[in-house]
Amino acid sequence: MRRSCVQTVLASLFTFVSLVFCAQAFEIEAQKRYPVAGAQRTISILSTADIAVFEPIILAFQLANPDISINYVTSGSTEVMKAIYEEGAQFDLVISSAMDLQTKLANDGFALDYSSEATASLPSWAKWRNQLFGFTQEPAVMVISEAAFANLDVPRTRQELIETLRDNPETFAGRVGTYDVRTSGLGYLFATQDSRNTESFWRLTEVMGRLDAQLYCCSGGMIADVASGKLALAYNVLGSYAESQLQGTDGLKIVPLDDFVGVMLRTALIPKGAKQAEGAGRMIDFLARLRTHPELTAATGLPPIVEQTQLSGTVLRPIRLGPGLLVFLDQLRRETFLRSWTSSIKQN
Amino acid sequence: MIRFLATTSIRRRLVVQLSVMAALLSIVFFVAVRSIAEQAAADTQDNILAASATSIADALYSERGQVRVELPYSALSMLGTISEDRVFYRVVADDETVTGYGDLAVPDVPARQRVAQFVTSEYRGEEVRVVSLARAVSNGERAADVRIIIAQTRRGLAVISSQITSTAMAVAIGFFLMATALSLLAAQSAVAPLKKLAQSVTRRGPKDLRPVVTKTPGELVPLVDALNNFMMRLRASLTRSEEFIAEAAHRVRTPLATVRTQAEVVYRQMEKPANRKALREMIRAVDESSRSAGQLLDHAMVTFRTDQLERDEIDLCKLAAETCERLQPTAELKDIEIIRELVAERAMIFGDNILLQNAVRNILDNAIKYSPAESSIVVRVTQDDDTIKLSVTDQGRGFANADLGKLTARFSRGVNVDDIVGSGLGLTIADEVVRAHNGQLRVESNKEGVGACVVLVFKRS
């Protein structure tokens, strides 16, 4: 059903396709095909990474593997989870920034084992069970509009941020953005990890709620609004996206907070029932060796897995893969967390 | 089997037995280490499961008559510390799922408060270790019966188990190889005294019947004693028979002398030529018998003296000259000339004078006996860098084509001696004497014509 719908919409290839609405349960944001003449197979990738961001990787992969066509479908991380976990959607590779949801997929038996020389070269913290493979490490940062902070000191810690927000309600009212953790899987991951790492998370949420914080589904929207001046500040934005958008925009500044910086691993897994598991494995190999393609890092802004960064930065707080990530996905725990969060962020 | 064991070498037997024991011990070691280590690994998983369940139990609370739980982060993250196993959990209050995997079965074990109970079962197609912990949570008026169930797959355990197995295997094989190598050494050293004893007996000369005095371990003492005892008896019996022969020869010789004297007297009185001829034949026969008896006596003496050899410095030239002198009359009877070529300047050797005289006399005597009348015999003493040679060359019939090696055996005679009476002991005596002096007796045909040549070769002292 989905396939036929997709085919009608994607009549012409290499055309950017914006939102596609089909009669299906999980929501596709965008889809693009990368066919290769004479390709023997097509791997379907379900991903949370925007086409614009991921395209250079796909093209580089096809350069190295000219026999593989790719059907690239993007969706939100919660939708990705829903597609695989509940609907058993047919994909060969699932890429998501929501580490906890990916971990749950692997834990609950929705992933296939895969191992190769390339995955063996990944550091042990960047993979789990030979099913889940991290290929980027992306920090959560704060993006500010330089204009809004013209007369203010840029806060370096969450504590300072709380004080700045509290002391300047006229500047920040309605102009603070963050993820809507109820709908964004990545936002939920960042928020729950924040709540583990710092006492000030709830106070910060509270302060942002009092300032009538704007809630977003995605980093892209937040960054765009900061750039346009609609927002003065966006909290917990994906650093990699900010970095790539910053290149063409003035007046934006990325502020990594000094108390800690949460680091997310973008992970890939081969879902059970994948028809092209072998081809998907080759994509995983390619992703696992992303550090050997610095030109792709430059083009996508996705920082590859590098051994040292995890060790050297004391401020960096990488989120560890493992069953711990299942805790905040617990029904009760999620319910409690969202109730607290909602009551903090929605005060008006 | 028993026959096989009886002929298998002690060393091999020891090695096989020790190796089999080492192999058994290795297997026992392997099994023990593996089961202990696997138990320890399994216990580790159980302990972490129990800790996880306890931390969840501690996070139970009751809200508006409902049992709730705030799952602690550490409860599940601690399960990821030792392995990358899948984790499932479920909290049940009064048979109603509070949270977690609703289809995770509650283990069929009697609920015991605050005691973690473990079962191994299967969930989602994989073997899992399940901990079950019961807690009562006060819920308004009554206490709710809460069960916490955590299941974890055992892939990590399998990995640890296979690591332990291969390590234990490697250690056990190493142990076995080392034990086998050591058992080879042990067997070697165990049979070493036996080898030493065998060598000390083998090295002995054919006539050395002295008791064995090699130091041997206690186990071999009865064997050595038995051997010594046997040799003593052998020696005694040999001595007895030699003595008997000597005694017999002596007893025969004395009356023979009387018979000969009487025969001579009678011979002179005889006038009939036929009678005289018969009597001459008789005297000749008596002479030969007497000579044989003498040689038997000589041989007995040689045997006796070679056991306790005297070592004086002897001039072989002088010795040869004396012997020639003594046999001169016998030679003259047949008109044989003894030519002496005693050219060596200093032909000194260490040895037993009487024995050497005996040897040379026997050879010269042989030469005279087998030489035709009016021939000559050459007695020669020569020397070179290493050896002194005494040779006696005659112009007799030689040794024909006889096996020269066999001639020196006792009572063995050449094939061409039918018409001459002899005991066959002459060369034997000479050979034994020369051997006792570390020398060599060579029997050759005369290179310069007909006849034989006997050479005594001695090492220079």
Image: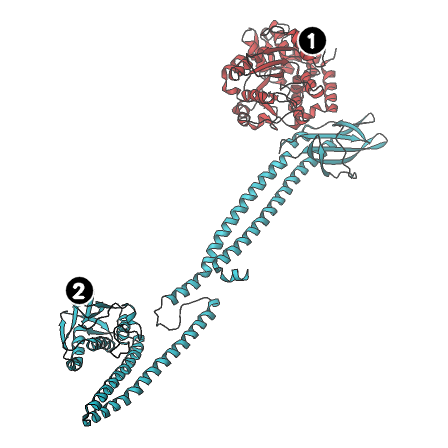
Chain colours: A red, B cyan
Nearer the observer: mark 2 or 1; the answer is: 2
Quadrant housing the C terminus of chain B: bottom left
Depicted B65 relative to depicted B308: above or below: above
Left or right? Give the position of A169 relative to A65. right
Residue B191: where, in percent of width, then height?
45, 61
Locate residue B167: give its quadrant. top right
Residue A295 seen in the figure: yes
Q: Tell me the tag on residue B384.
A: 2
Q: Pointer 2 indicates a residue of which chain?
A: B
Depicted B394 relative to depicted B275: above or below: above
- What residue appears at the point 24 percent right and 89 percent down from the top-left corner? B260
* Residue identified by numbered label 1: A21
Is disc 2 surrounded by few (<14), some (14 to 19) or many (20+) residues within 10 Å?
Answer: few
Observer-nearest residue: A53 or A114? A114
Identify which amino acid the numbered label 1 is placed on.
Answer: Phe
Left or right? Give the position of B213 relative to A70. left
Locate residue B446: give its quadrant. bottom left
Residue B185: where, in percent of width, then height?
46, 55
Observer-nearest residue: B286 or B147? B286
Identify which amino acid the numbered label 2 is placed on.
Answer: Asp
Q: How many marks?
A: 2
- Provide the secondary structure element on which disc 1 rests: loop
Locate residue A195: give its quadrant. top right
Q: Tell me the tag on residue A303.
A: none
Left or right? Give the position of B391 relative to B165. left
Residue B214: where, in percent of width, then height?
40, 68
Residue A257 seen in the figure: no
Give the CA distance from mark 2 to mark 1: 124 Å
- What residue appears at the point 39 percent right and 64 percent down from the top-left corner? B199
